[in-house]
Image (spheres, grey):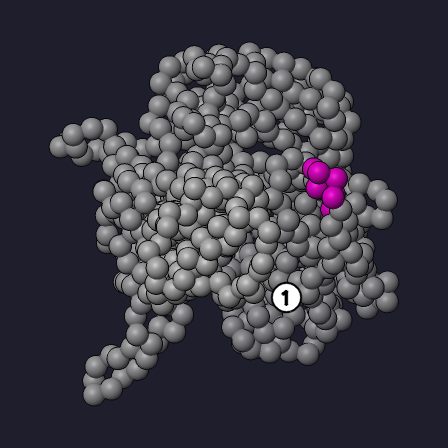
Amino acid sequence: MFDFFRNTLPPWQWALLALVPPAIIALYFLKLKRQPLEVPSTYLWKRSIEDLHVNSLWQRLRQNLLMFLQLLLIALAMFALLRPGWEGTKLNGDRFIFLVDNSASMSANDVEGAQSRLEESKKLVGGLIDQMDAGMTAMIISFADTPQVVQEFTDNRRLLRERLATIEPTVRGTDLHGALDLADGLANPGRTRIQEGGADIDVVEAQPATIYIFSDGRFEDVKGFSLGNLKPVYVPIGSFEARNLAITGFSTRRSEARPEERQAFVQVTNYTESPQSAVVEVLLDGNFLDAKQVEVPAGESSGAVFPLADAPAGKLTARLKYELDTPTKRDALEQDDTGYAALNDAKPGRVLVVTPGNVALEVAFATERSGKLGAIQFKTPDVLTTDEYKRDADGSVFDLIIYDQCAPATMPRANTLFVGRLPPGPVWRGGREEASGQKDGNDEKGSNTAASAANNAADEVTTVPQIIDWDRAHPVLSSVELANVALVDSLVLDPPPGATVLIDSTAGPIAAIAPRDAYQDVVLGFEIFGQNKDGTRNVNTNWPTKLSFPTFWLNALEYLAGGTEESQTASVRPGRAVELRAAGNVPELTVVDPAGKTHTIRRSAEDVFQFHDTHQLGVYDVRQRDAVTERFAVNLFDRDESDVRVRPSQDPDAPVTQAADIHIGHVDVKAQVGRAPTRKEVWKAILACALAVLVFEWYIYNRRVYL
């Protein structure tokens, strides 16, 4: 849009500036007051007469080059302040919000003339800032999965440009909803409604703003948001033909054929329109381990398995090597060409089994696999009253405590599994307080049935319950078949809010799991074995004779004791918090990020260590004193970010291929055709000319040249 001049000064400043040219001319009209001089030279006498004649007030002004140069200098300065230019987008309105996407996909290098999409976005925003007139204000917000205010509302264009330059790329996902919420809150900080006469009245007058969204559109539709006084303008950044290969998965696991050996699995995804071939290299602590070639069909994924044999604990890196049919032979996004995984030593969880005697449990935990998953100790219920147990339970020494036919006075700092008993307190009793007869964890009634386990008169017991369903998807019941399991009796559970029912019967839930701060509590309402008053033992279920019985206890060890290597090597997304644990009552841990920077974190009130600074891709070391106790990896592994192709519009009536609309609430925001054009301004060239005139005027003055 043609708009040659852009005003930059308010009227009163222009009025002051307009007084400068008349003042310059007046100075040349004013008569100089000089002392009369007598000179012996006729020539000098003639020049003195001429000077007196020229400087007389209101005489005809003689041509003077210095005056014209000074007037020209002021004219050029005034012309530059009008900011002449052409072919720029005219900003309509008084308030503007610039949302700049700096997520991982904005590092793609598919924009001609720019290093990345982010740099192109910053260039376009800078052009809009240059077009702001006097009285206009703007703010800048960058956003990935979380928004950040770069600069609040200001009319200072220089400050806006400086703050814009500070936006850095990230390796995180994209969430536009949070950025819109932040923009709406800052654009309308006092938006509050009161009731008056049955109508809503705004306490603070609404202030409309135009919101520019610079992004490649790699985010989900924004639901549940009302634009209100925000007028959206979507400027798509990127191309439809961007090509990319990415590592979208990297993990370690035990070999199914040889459980004693570990192996690494790498997944490669092809985001192009043709099949691609790539070589995957795997390194351990920077040293080459193995390499394989993978063939990846267009738009699909392929995997490669790398045997690790007896590789020591360390940092695994997977790299892609390939050539694409592009000018640079590379793809559009290089951040996802590398994946990371942590290879940790197997650390069996510490498990305490408190039981008066249970042969079935002892047999289930006697396998080699159980020994690798947990270091298991068996104790009798009288241990619950000892100072050693209380110290260990309160100091997080154990990862899992199994209470068989008994219960402690207070819950420990550990995951728990109760067999035939309810945890202490009212949580598992629907808010009812428990009876005081079980404070030491022993059952005084001496019966083998679950009825004897009811330590409160209101605890419901059912006889011969039939199992009708169980949660096969839960890790504790994975591959566990309970259809042929019979029970004599069982407690009917009243799980707390947030619990998951694991086993349901004709009488109600008889097994459930519930969170407790940083821990998990599993309750089986039925006993395996019981004991009569005369000391004889009785069987309450036929479950120990089924193959699902040892499977259940192995699942419990894997899920609750945290002793599997797979659980220790899980990858997290950038920016996500990581929960860390430490054996014993350790007050703090040290985390070393991939750049070598150390972070000290302290134990939280929930008895875990929360680490939030996961902003870099790579492997992080967790140190307890000087020893590395654990490692974890941070990877992009985000298909929305790795598929960097701008989504094309599905509108068949569109004259040219253009970016798809974005959806904000119930509003479809059309992509702006082309890019927001940058205004071509010539004020810098005009100022350069003014500087040249100033230099020439200085030269004339110093040479005393008058024409």
Local crowd at mark 1 within 10 Å, few (<14), some, or many (≥20)?
many
Q: Residue furthest bottom?
A: 197
Work out which quarter of the rendered image holds the C terminus and state it.
top left
The answer to which image quadrant residue 257 occupies is: top right
- Does residue 308 show up? yes
The part of the chain drawn in magenta is 591-597
Work out whether 37 lies above or below 91.
Answer: below
Judging by the rendered image, the residue that carries numbered circle 1 is 423
Q: Amino acid at mark 1?
A: Pro
Question: Residue 476: x percent and y percent?
Answer: 57, 46
Of 676 and 504, which appears nearest the observer?
A: 676
Work out which quarter of the rendered image holds the N terminus and state it.
top left
Q: Residue at x 80, y 41 (%)?
A: 628
Judge whether residue 147 is colored magenta.
no
Question: Residue 425: x percent and y percent?
Answer: 63, 73
Work out whether 154 lies above or below 287.
Answer: below
Q: Residue at x 84, y 42 (%)?
A: 627
Question: Residue 88: x percent and y percent?
Answer: 29, 42
Main SS, magenta residues: loop
Of 189 and 692, which appears nearest the observer?
A: 692
Q: Residue at x 69, y 55 (%)?
A: 609
Question: Residue 217: x percent and y percent?
Answer: 36, 40
Work out whether 228 lies above or below 572.
Answer: below
Counting the numbered discs, the total is 1
Q: Residue at x 43, y 15 (%)?
A: 326
Q: Residue furthest left?
A: 653
In terms of secondary structure, where does tag 1 sit? loop
Judge whether residue 594 is colored magenta.
yes
- Does residue 157 show up? no
